[in-house]
Amino acid sequence: MKKYFGTDGIRGEANRDLTPELALKLGRAGIRALGGGGCRVIVGRDTRVSGMMLESALVAGMLAEKADVLLAGVIPSPAVAFLTEDLGTDVGVVISASHNPFVDNGIKFFGPGGIKLPDDIEKAIEAEFEALAVSGAGGPVGEATIVRDAEERYVAHLCSSASFSLEGFKVALDCANGAAYRVCPEAFGRLGATVETIGAEPDGRNINLDTGSTHPGRLADLVTRWGAQAGFALDGDADRCICVDETGEVRDGDFIMAIAAKYLKEHDLLHPPLIVSTVMSNMGLYKALEENGIQSIQAPVGDRYVLEEMHATGSLLGGEQSGHIVFREHASTGDGTLTALLMAGMLKESRESLSELSSIMRKYPQVLLNVTPRSGRRLEPGMPVWETVRKYARELGDNGRVLVRSSGTEPVERVMVEATSLRLAEDVAQSIADAITRELDGYA
């Protein structure tokens, strides 16, 4: 069990949970666990006001351990993954809390090739973190250098991966006032698209605020009002993408995977005919894939677990309902801008609307509830509440699904229920959520 790292790095409220002192110590521990003095690291961050504070402390710790650090500035998480490989660095680090509000921040690591670290390496970093003495390493220190062409390298990579023209394509983009506020519109513009943007005026405090992949309402309004052929919403660090079709209907990561899998298979580009999703994906996705002769495998929640399974099976496409989509031929992690570009290209080439392509999948009614017990306790194996969960799962049978899990990024328990009707899904989800609250808060 990891003590500090969650599903996607270390997160917490900046300057309270995630302090400069912690970041400095983590920088030192990370270098010790990932290669020691002399290794090269690239660091990027999103637009949060706390980003530079944490970057300064983290980098100071790395330099103290004799690492050389390349500073990419404000840039998406997948850009750091790309640059880790492109520049041949040993480590990539992103300072971001993804879709969380601006008061939060986080730190996550990539290894060589831009691959997120496996659990055992994160545990090694935690061990070094707890073993560190207060005194410094002594002797020479590393050097820090600004990578002035970081954005240009990444945008060029995006455009070469897309390799098609978007002339005549009207697209609305919501950049969540986050890390892709410059690179995403730039990439679409270079490919010839006509672009309108929202969420592209970050002030350090408005990241994800009523905008982005978790709040696609404004984007849906823009798409229908402006007559765009599609809209794409990213999150704060731009590793997620959610689509909006021409009618204003939101199409999540499951729709993206279904559409992309069918397109790639029809163009003989999906070898093997297999995608990797997570346990959170809708039943409708699995039925759509099966009807189109495409296999599916479920991984635990987290795009790094998806990628691990993709490598193990040879799958070229995988992702999450939340919009982390991995096109493994082009990227080593979920990339929101790349996903948006490739989806736009598929739309333009198919000459069908996004609503038409989305008809491949019938989405089962799904209810997601977050339970935050006042006690602060978390679910554990063997608790009586699991029998309640199993009871409802048995009652739904093949016509529904129940999933209960502890979040790896927030102190909440997540309840997901799918059923043949929304009312049934809501009733079952609320009953399970109430049972969890009674269990963890200790009242009958």
Image (cartoon, rainbow, N blue to C red):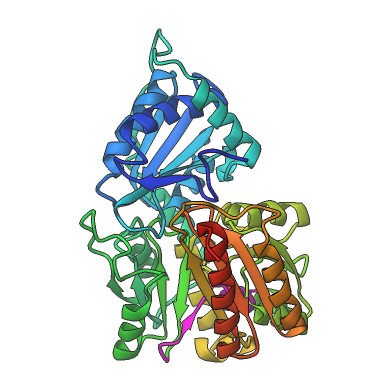
Q: Can the viewer see residue 292 in this picture?
A: no
Horizontal side, residue 268 vs residue 358: left or right: right
Q: Nearer the viewer, residue 75 or 437?
A: 437
Question: Which quadrant of the view contains residue 71?
Answer: top left
Residue 429 position in % (x across, y down): 57, 76
Q: How many marks?
A: 0
Residue 250 position in % (x across, y down): 46, 82
Question: Which quadrant of the view contains residue 402?
Answer: bottom right
Q: Nearer the viewer, residue 442 or 368?
A: 442
> Magenta segment, which residues?
247-261
Horizontal side, residue 13 vs residue 339: left or right: left
Image point 53% across, 35% down: which residue?
Answer: 88
Q: Nearer the viewer, residue 4 or 45?
A: 4
Q: Is residue 36 above or below residue 392?
A: above
- Residue that lies at the very extreme toward the left in this rendered image: 203
Horizontal side, residue 243 vs residue 356: left or right: left
Quadrant including the C terminus: bottom right
Residue 289 position in % (x across, y down): 72, 79
Horizontal side, residue 350 vs residue 52: left or right: right
Q: Is residue 343 above or below residue 156?
A: below
- Residue that lies at the very extreme toward the top in this rendered image: 139
Q: Can the viewer see residue 139 in this picture?
A: yes
Residue 135 magenta: no
- Residue that lies at the very extreme toward the front in this rendered image: 444
Image point 72% across, 85% down: which residue?
Answer: 399
Residue 52 position in % (x across, y down): 27, 40
Quadrant including the N terminus: top right
Q: Is residue 178 above or below residue 255?
A: above
Q: Is residue 436 above or below residue 110?
A: below
Image point 44% across, 76% down: which residue?
Answer: 166
Question: Which quadrant of the view contains residue 406?
Answer: bottom right
